[in-house]
Amino acid sequence: MTRDSLTRRTVTRRTTIRRDGTRRTMNRHSLTRQAGKIALSALGVLIALVWAFPVYWMLVSAVTPNARLRAVTPTFFPDHFTTRSFARLLGSGSSFWPALRMSLTVTSVAVVVVLVCAFFGALAVSRFQFRGRKGFILSVLFIQMLPAEGLFIAQYRLLANAGMLNRVGGIAILYAAAIIPFTVWMLRGFVAGVPAELEEAAMVDGLTRTQAFRRVTLPLLAPGLVASGVYAFLQAWNEFTIALVALPANSSNTLPLWLRGFMTASVARGVDWAQVMAASTLITVPVIILFLVVHHHMTAGVVSGAVKG
């Protein structure tokens, strides 16, 4: 055997050993990555279960008799299924329907006012340079820092002097005033993300400033408007403390105030938790319907305004 052949065999063995070592190292890294992914997936599933359990418990309690809920042993599955609580809440003469109409009306008015005011505020802050711009931005941040409880007395006296207590307009104004500052910051990010050059290019093509804004910029801002509208809807729909101040009469309750009535009216005989959970489920139904309607439109219009046609 010649020296050249021995050298070639030695090089071949070394190359094979290196390749085997590299493959083993890659296999170990691959197994480590797969184990990490499995661990992260399991952690995500666990967090999701913890997050979803209160909703599941609410639904199970809503279809379980109150006597079974008050038992020492908790019921995690509806072994005594009943819809009696929903029937009592939705039956004739129930106060649910007036409260639902009140909540829908107040929330709709508040959302419209919030979107209009916050939209123009975000445009002013993002697109224009004017005197007092920094002061306006700082005032928006300062308003967010004020505790809502510190304004209750002033708000009540303001509505009482204006004759707006127990009125849709009065409570809608308070809702809008509380929601607008943060909504301005939400829309400001969306407006700043749309280049002004798109409008300028559309104006070069013969459009006026208003037409360029309506055909180019506004479709691009549609996802931001939808997201801000959803945020405003949730804030107004679930608001309790402002409604407690602005709606002192029991005849003009929103749904959160209506839900509180089950707790105060049942103290003597004990809380009917099945009815409370059924009422809580009914309050969440409009929110679920809203998300089912708008979730397809959250990303609609992202590039539609940038297409010339």
Image (cartoon, rainbow, N blue to C red):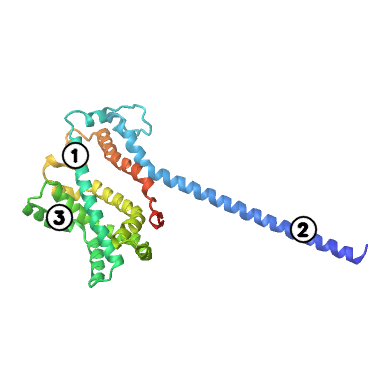
From the image, which quarter does the N terminus lie in?
bottom right
Residue that mark 1 sits on: 99
Residue 47 horizontal/vertical position (percent): 43, 47
Callout count: 3
Q: Distance between the residues labelled 3 and 1?
A: 22 Å
Mark 2 is on which residue type? Thr
Give the mark nearest the N terminus, 2 or 1: 2
Q: Distance between the residues labelled 3 and 2?
A: 79 Å
Asked whether the residues under the numbered discs 3 and 2 touch, taking CB atoms below 8 Å apart as contact, a structural biologist would say no
Q: How crowded is mark 1: few (under 14 residues within 10 Å), some or many (20 or more)?
A: many
- Residue at horizontal 40%, vertical 44%? 50
Q: From this viewpoint, which residue is outermost toward the front?
A: 206
Residue 249 horizontal/vertical position (percent): 11, 43
Residue 245 visible in rendering? no
Residue 254 horizontal/vertical position (percent): 19, 43
Instruction: Name the image quarter holding residue 133.
Output: bottom left
The answer to whether 235 appears left or right of 32 in the picture is left
- Residue at horizontal 37%, vertical 50%? 298
Q: Is mark 3 on a helix, strand or loop?
A: helix
Residue that mark 3 sits on: 152
Q: Residue 16 carries which label?
A: 2
From the image, which quarter does the C terminus lie in?
bottom left
